[in-house]
Image (spheres, grey):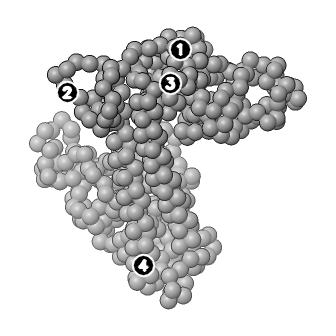
Amino acid sequence: MAKIDDSVKKEVPELRFKGFTDDWEKRKLGELANIVGGGTPSTSNPEYWDGDIDWYAPAEIGEQSYVSKSKKTITELGLKKSSARILPVGTVLFTSRAGIGNTAILAKEATTNQGFQSIVPDQNKLDSYFIFSRTNELKRYGEVTGAGSTFVEVSGKQMSKMSIMVPELSEQQKIGSFFKQLDETIALHQRKLDLLKEQKKGFLQKMFPKNGAKVPELRFAGFADDWEQRKLGDLSQDTIGGGTPKTSVTEYWNGEIPWIQSSDLANDKLYGVLPKKFITEDAVKNSATKLIPANSIAIVTRVGVGKLAFMPYEFASSQDFLSLSNLKVDCNFGMYSIYKMLQRELNNIQGTSIKGITKADLLDKEIFVPIKVEEQRKIGSFLKQLDDTIALHQRKLDLLKEQKKGFLQKMFV
């Protein structure tokens, strides 16, 4: 790829493939493609349904780049007796209402209901993946120009008038192919991440005793003893609450002590909390917040109840937390056993506008613990390693998505 000399003002993108130098042209979308609506056969006539023709609804669009199988199908008679139209392979389905701007490319010819204004590219003028890659532009245009009282809808006539900058077809194809490869890589990483998360769910179910059992379904070799039932309060020597220093006193803030609040934690991220606020020693002395030792488990008991995190450094917290310090169990095992218990108990937590759990109720919750610390360590280490792998794949996926954003900004006019 080659960068453009900024001193020369041309209608070209900042980043281009080598060999392309011509200016891009401003065209109307309707000059490059046919915009085709859809239709719905009468639902009261069974002869129109369950045929061989795919028929898409807007709710099916948005998760995949390509679609090849719809949830519902219609018959040839249903096609004739409605305004639905057969759309060829390569058509970019574009939802025109009930969530404007979701797109997918047809991998197999199909029809749609009336919630679409689909883009059927002229094969000599417009590349399918090139225009699909500009989904964000199409969506913005549809949302701005759409109209309606009950719900916003953009018409085919309006979509045809959309101005769009395009290069000649071979450059479009090069760009389309580049983004297709990038999207496939992102999808591959997403599948790997989803699979790892499913594996983690499975291990969490099988590596802890189920209701009524004293041993888990899945164990490391060499361990056969029954697990012990303990109260959550027995897992640590100290339990510490939190508080919020007065926000109006500037001397209490921007110090060196990390101060966490519920919003700093994510539901399924047990490690790696990055506090956004820091307080001073004066804040600790003059408020309900307390200094909590490193290697404690912070549990949200009010807003965002059920979230928890392992804190490897000294910290303080808001009043939404109860922290377990000086643990009597392996810290990683303690994290996952509490996490699993909280997921199970969440449905029983009382509260209306703010769901919460009292300190006494939380500490009274029962947890099964292996007698041997070595078994605790093995379980905790295994699950922590799995979480680290998930976090690594998440970072890779986030990086790829950021790279795509950058390319989208630089490779289109």
Q: Which mark is residue 30?
A: 1
> Which residue lies at the image location 52% right of the left edge and 58% below the top edge?
195
Query: Mark 1 or 4 closer to N-term?
Result: 1
- Quadrant of res 166: top left
Q: Nearer the viewer, mark 1 or mark 4?
A: 1
Q: Which of pointers 2 and 3 lies earlier in the amino acid sequence? A: 2
Q: Relative to residue 10, is residue 47 depicted above or below?
A: below
Q: Could you tell me how far apart the alpha carbons at marks 2 and 3 are, in whole angstroms?
A: 27 Å
* Residue 180 coordinates in the image, percent (x, y): 47, 40
Give, as a three-letter code, the residue at label 3: Leu
Q: Nearer the viewer, mark 3 or mark 4?
A: 3
Instruction: Name the residue beneath numbered marker 2.
Output: 5
Q: Residues within 10 Å of mark 1 (few under 14, many from 20)?
A: many
Estimate the spatial distance between the alpha carbons at disc 1 and disc 2, rounded to whole Å: 32 Å
User: To which quarter of the image does residue 249 belong?
Assistant: top left
| Front residue of 376 and 132 | 132
The correct choice, above or below, for 185 with respect to 131 in the image is below
Q: CA distance from mark 1 to mark 4?
A: 63 Å
Instruction: Give coordinates of residue 328: x percent, y percent.
Output: 35, 76
Q: Residue at x 58, y 39 (%)?
A: 66
Closer to the N terminus: mark 3 or mark 1?
A: 1
Q: Is 63 above or below relative to 20?
A: below
Tag nearer the camera, 1 or 2: 2
Amino acid tagged 2: Asp
> Mark 3 or 4 closer to N-term?
3
Q: Secondary structure at mark 3?
A: loop
- Do callouts 1 and 2 mark residues in contact (Cβ within 8 Å)? no
Residue at the image point whose x is 44% and y is 47% from the top: 186
**Horizontal side of residue 290 vs 218, given as left or right:** left
